[in-house]
Image: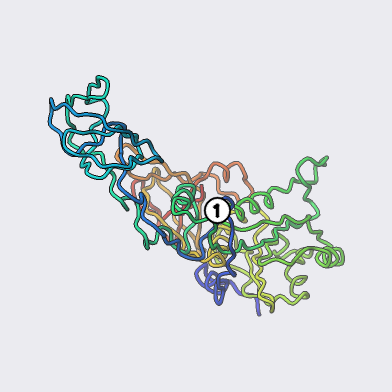
Amino acid sequence: MAAEIISLDEARARLLEGVVPLPSEQVAIGEAAGRVLAADVVAVRNQPPTRVSAMDGYAVAGAVVGELLRVIGEAPAGAPFAGSVGPGEAVRIATGGVVPQGATRVVIQEHVARDGEEIRVEALSNGMHVRPAGGDFAAGQVVAKAGQVITPGRLGLIAATGCGTVTVARRPRVAVMASGDELREPGAVMGADAIFNSGAYAIAALVEAWGGEALRLPILPDDRAALDAALAGADLNVDVIVPLGGASVGDRDQLRPAFEALGAKILFDKVAVIPGKPTWAARFLDGRLLVGLPGNPASGFVCAHLFLKSLIAVLTGRDAGLRLRAARLAAPIGANGAREAWLRARVEVDAAGQSLVTVESRQDSSLTSVLAAADALVRRAVDAPALAAGEAVETLLIG
């Protein structure tokens, strides 16, 4: 394919075309947090399965203020009272205890005075304090849907249905490999001509956060022969390969031709976006995908959100769309140029509850401190005009 610069939308379409979710697998409920459901979870019984008390107190068949009632038994949680409650009778009941037959309400314990086996009703609240059978969810109800991430709250809901295992999407294995002879791993002894490999750690963390399984491989060299040897010995038995850097126009940028020699077919090799013009993608005949990200930390991080996040979403059965939100500018910004721009920014909520976004003044793609402070990207269309404070912009949250 001849070198061409294509739009972000076209590049995303080429990358995601024909991509389908990975096969599903069964995992134990205790290992399911953070996974993506590949099948609906359906309740097999009502929750609660029968009427239960919402408060500690006394289950009664009906009562009026000042009435004396005889206590005929107890109903702690997990040990129902075997009989029924009639007029003039009460059963001591705990929160979650099964409401006995005949009882119509629970008088909370603060509203009674007890003397031996007798209670006097001193007040009645408006509520009946009885949770109906199926009040949380009913048998046959879908409580969690395929494509949803199993959050802690959703995990508790699934566990409440009694499911011991769930069907989830297999986590895509993603190999992340930085490239460049100037890179050193954090902790290494450094010279003035070297920099620490920060990008691979950030991208691998994003992969894990998005539901993938990151495999961070050793730094790739620039020399073509050494690069070919490194790739030959690398674990590329993965679903997605993410090389960082090495794809610009310099003589030592050899990643694209090296992967092409391994059989990768280029999908695109430049994108009309800033930061991230050198982003590229390829596909192997066996279905493996490659997303080449820029080596500069901010460029790679931004383009991971624009490309890699969506790819992982499709592989795990989720929506791949960019979820843009409107926000108002806290300060004016200038006009945009000939490439679509994604500006690092910070979002806050003002006293009126509106989202205000502040675009970072320094947008250099090598600045990791600016990147770490940002929790959003502001999207600027090609040739977008200057905007005043208070005008609306599209934002993509990255925090």
**Local crowd at mark 1 within 10 Å, few (<14), some, or many (≥20)?**
some
* Nearer-the-camera pick, 156 or 252: 156
Measured as percent of width and height from the top left, residue 250 is found at 75, 63
**Quick check: can you spot residue 382?**
no
Q: Is residue 316 left or right of residue 195?
A: left
In front here: 205 or 99? Answer: 99
Quadrant location of residue 383?
bottom left
- Identify the residue under disc 1: 29
Residue 82 visible from this viewpoint: yes
- Residue 293 left/right relative to 148: right
Q: Is residue 269 left or right of residue 340?
A: right
Residue 279 is situated, as x and y percent measured from the top left of the image, at 62, 64
From the top left corner, tell me how far across and down residue 118 is, in percent: 23, 24
Tell how many labels: 1
Nearer to us in this view, 62 or 140 = 62
Colour logic: rainbow
SS at mark 1? helix
Where does residue 356 sit, x and y in percent of width and height?
Answer: 38, 44
The residue at the point 52 percent across, 73 percent down is 13
Residue plotted at (84% across, 64% down): 233
The quadrant of the rendering that contains the N terminus is bottom right
Could you say which quadrant of the image residue 82 lies in?
A: top left
- Check disc 1 and give the amino acid type: Ile
Q: Is residue 6 above or below residue 103?
A: below
